[in-house]
Amino acid sequence: MSTYRDFTAPIGSRRAPVLRTVGTRERRSHLTAPRVPTVGIDIGGTKVMAGVVDADGNILEKVRTETPDKSKSPKVVEDTIVELVLDLSDRHDVHAVGIGAAGWVDADRNRVLFAPHLSWRNEPLRDRLAGRLAVPVLVDNDANSAAWAEWRFGAGRGEDHLVMITLGTGIGGAILEDGQVKRGKYGVAGEFGHMQVVPGGHRCPCGNRGCWEQYSSGNALVREARELAAADSPVAYGIIEHVKGNIGDISGPMITELAREGDAMCIELLQDIGQWLGVGIANLAAALDPSCFVIGGGVSAADDLLIGPARDAFRRHLTGRGYRPEARITRAQLGPEAGMVGAADLARLVARRFRRANRRRVERYERYERYVEARRSSQDSA
């Protein structure tokens, strides 16, 4: 690196000054952000993925490691993040770090209020990491980061009102309007998975019953398949044979694979999940009226097996159907790297502060060197 470690601390000090991000929202357009490399980090329940991303959304290098066990202290995860950033900064001139965290992030994008898969509770992640790294740090929800990436570089390009829905273990989401992520007053907007769609329905880990993600998510897909297999249903014989009777081995990717091979039960299960997805999207359209819905997350790998039924259900349940424009429903394009790419690109919005502060630090260092040299010359001449 050229400046990351060479000039991180003033003369006579081993501590680098903490550089804070800009205010509570993006104050500079992505169009005017510096075209410099930044690091994006996607923190999930099973892995931490980090990558250096350029201004066009290209991943220059990517590294990943397992997420430390959630029973460990938050500092263990912070240590993992720092190690990955320092590893990448050895080979790249990094100007900022963006983090997409699977959890609730406050409106200031500093604290992780709650992370279901990690022991973060009201954790000041941005300030802690900024105190250990010599570049600005930006923290956001992982669905917000993924939506930003799809809007900038993927399926949502050109859309001015976009809603992203991420289908994984549960359902996450994000809202973009006119180039701004809408985070809500307290930073936790977009938790679409916990809209109640079936009063008194399946119990959700959030504590409520009938949440949307209990009917249209990876967990819902696997739960239905396992229930049919456990009941020894004739329609489940194909998947029972596939797992050799070990019902606990049934997984979402396996169901998608068997559906592509023509297994009738797996196709039907994806249709059911897709129909519930369409119902939820129709509700969101009534509330938000976006021009485009982007469907991401691991379950979206089923593509038209899932999104086709979702489009059909959306048209059947849309309020004012036949008398209003219909939003486009499309699959995300950036895959599992979307959160990482989006976090890096959002971090680019605050990279200019680092460049200016670092340039001033270098200039101070050079002035000090000239001063020392002049004093030395003057003493030698005397």
Image (cartoon, grey):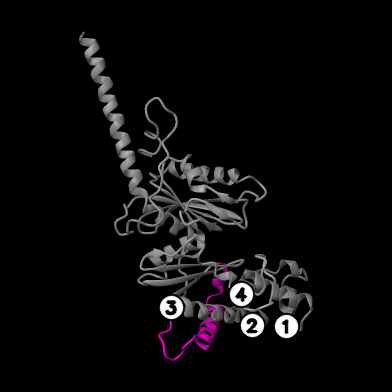
User: Distance of mark 4 from mark 3, alpha carbons?
Assistant: 19 Å
* Helix, strand or loop for disc 2: helix
Labels 3 and 2: the sequence-earlier one: 2
| Number of marks in picture | 4
Closer to the camera: disc 2 or disc 4? 4
From the top left corner, tell me how far across and down residue 17 is, in percent: 41, 36
User: Distance of mark 3 from mark 2, alpha carbons?
Assistant: 29 Å
Identity of the amino acid at label 3?
Asp
The C terminus, quarter of image: top left
Labels 4 and 1: the sequence-earlier one: 4
Residue sitting nearer the eye, 298 or 316: 316
User: Distance of mark 1 from mark 2, alpha carbons?
Assistant: 10 Å
Q: Which residue is mark 4?
A: 196
User: Distance of mark 4 from mark 1, alpha carbons?
Assistant: 30 Å
Q: Are marks 1 and 3 in contact (CB under 8 Å)?
A: no
Range covered by the magenta-colored residues: 298-327
From the top left corner, tell me how far across and down residue 269 is, in percent: 64, 79
Labels 1 and 2: the sequence-earlier one: 1
Q: Which residue is mark 1?
A: 235
Identity of the amino acid at label 4?
Gln
Q: Which residue is mark 3?
A: 289
User: Height in image: 26 above or below 211?
Assistant: above
Residue for point 77% across, 81% down: 233
Q: Residues within 10 Å of mark 2 (few under 14, many from 20)?
A: some
Taking the magenta stretch, the answer to whether it contains residue 306 is: yes
- Which image quadrant for residue 175? bottom left
